[in-house]
Image (cartoon, rainbow, N blue to C red):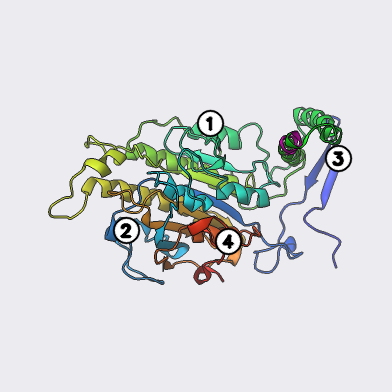
Amino acid sequence: MSKWNRRRVLKGMVRGVGVTVALPLLDYFLNGNGTAMAQGAPMPVRFGTWGYGLGGTGKLFVPEQTGQNYALPEELSSWAPIQDDVNLFTNGHAFPDASPNRNHYTGWVVSRTGIAPAAGSGTSETIDLTVAKKIGGATRFTNLTATATADARDTYSYYNSSTPNAPEWSPLSFYKRLFGIDFQDPNADEFEQDPQVIARRSVLSGIMDQERSLMNTVGVADRERLDQYFTGLRQLELQFEQRLTKPEPIASCAPPGRAPVDVAMDQSTESIKLRHQMMAELMAMAVACDQTRVFNMTYSAAFASTIRPGYDKPHHTCTHEEPVHEELGYQENASYFTRRAMESWVDFVEVFKKIPEGDGTLLDNVLILGTTDVGYARTHSVDGMSVFLAGRAGGKVKTGNHIDLNGGSVAQVGFTALRTMGVDTPSWGTLSNESSEVISDVLV
């Protein structure tokens, strides 16, 4: 067996600071297919979510056929380039159980937590952050969250009922955070440790050394609080270590050469599409560069305020007030907004599909959960809901299917995603939304 591996490094000093420079990603280090390291470790599988508001328009959204090669209905016509890369689940339900149906809230919360929120309460930990605990610790960012709405309040990611996972809302700010002065290009020839990070790690180490003594001097309630506090510090410690270690070369990492230009921050469909596209491209490249393995994108909030030029009502108001068109048989403008959302879903999937990785694409090594808040937009019902899964999760998922959930909970899809991502839990959710069996039709 060779004594060489991808961790082999060249060592030296730069300005008195120890430096390690990893060897480039050689074919020697990969298996014959370029899908795994020569030592057998597979390419990393990443997890993401995508969310939009106000569902769809019944038969215009739900295909008549199930299985593969189904005919795309009108509101999903834009899916043609990605149909074979996505699993579509329809006819799902978000069961409120003993809780009221909280419009624009219950649906997406059940899809992302498996738990119907009680009156006056918030959401529990969302699926992305559960997965982040499993796979997010080895990267610069435990997770990345962004919104195309230009409103930092718009997120479908929560740590708990009182703590939203605040998104980046500006493409320029997102670029600076990801690829600004703190970005460590894994393909750079040289690497220099940041003295500020070294200092911060030293201070943190001193704090961590006090953990045991503090734990032994406080009561049970305070121990729980301290345990949560030190868990966060341990995560920060891992991130410091990551920033002080030369990243391994990544062939698919090609960071943008310049920052994006300022874009309009209005709510028109054109501006939202542009912001979404820019942030999606930044996010996908951050994933390709292994800056994160968990990511979230919001296209529109549940109370979607997207505006159609020349029409006087935003999307949400439109679903309530627009009359059904006598000839078409549906709300024409409401359907327009849904079609624009689906076009941006296609854009999001395609940015991962366009980045080569191994012998395939980045999309082959991700799993993206797409959710909404209602089924039929006009009635705001939480039955007849749809959920999407894009990507093949490193070969664990077979795609291109339309699955009828037959009125079962939408949480079944979330549970399937959790198990696919290696979260070892026998069930997920509570009461009528509890799921303990994966949807085997989409698993290899």
In the picture, the disc for residue 173 is 1
> What's the residue type where badge 3 is placed?
Gly
- Residue at image location 31% in from the left, 40% down from the top: 316
Q: Which stretch did the figure color magenta?
A: 222-227
Residue that mark 3 sits on: 12
Q: State how far apart marks 2 and 3 are (Cα).
A: 60 Å
Relative to 152, is 397 above or below? below
Instruction: From the viewer's side, name the closer residue of 7 and 414.
Output: 414
* Quadrant of the snapshot with the C terminus: bottom right
> What's the residue type where badge 1 is placed?
Ser
**Outermost residue, left direction?**
326
Residue that mark 4 sits on: 393
Q: Nearer the viewer, mark 1 or mark 4?
A: 4
Q: State how far apart marks 1 and 4 are (Cα).
A: 29 Å
Q: State how far apart marks 2 and 1 are (Cα).
A: 35 Å
Q: Residues within 10 Å of mark 3 (few under 14, many from 20)?
A: few
Q: Position of residue 215 (x, y in %)?
A: 82, 35
* Image mark count: 4
Of labels 1 and 4, earlier in sequence is 1
Q: Position of residue 156 (x, y in %)?
A: 49, 43
* Quadrant of the snapshot with the N terminus: bottom right
Of labels 2 and 1, earlier in sequence is 2
In the picture, the disc for residue 61 is 2
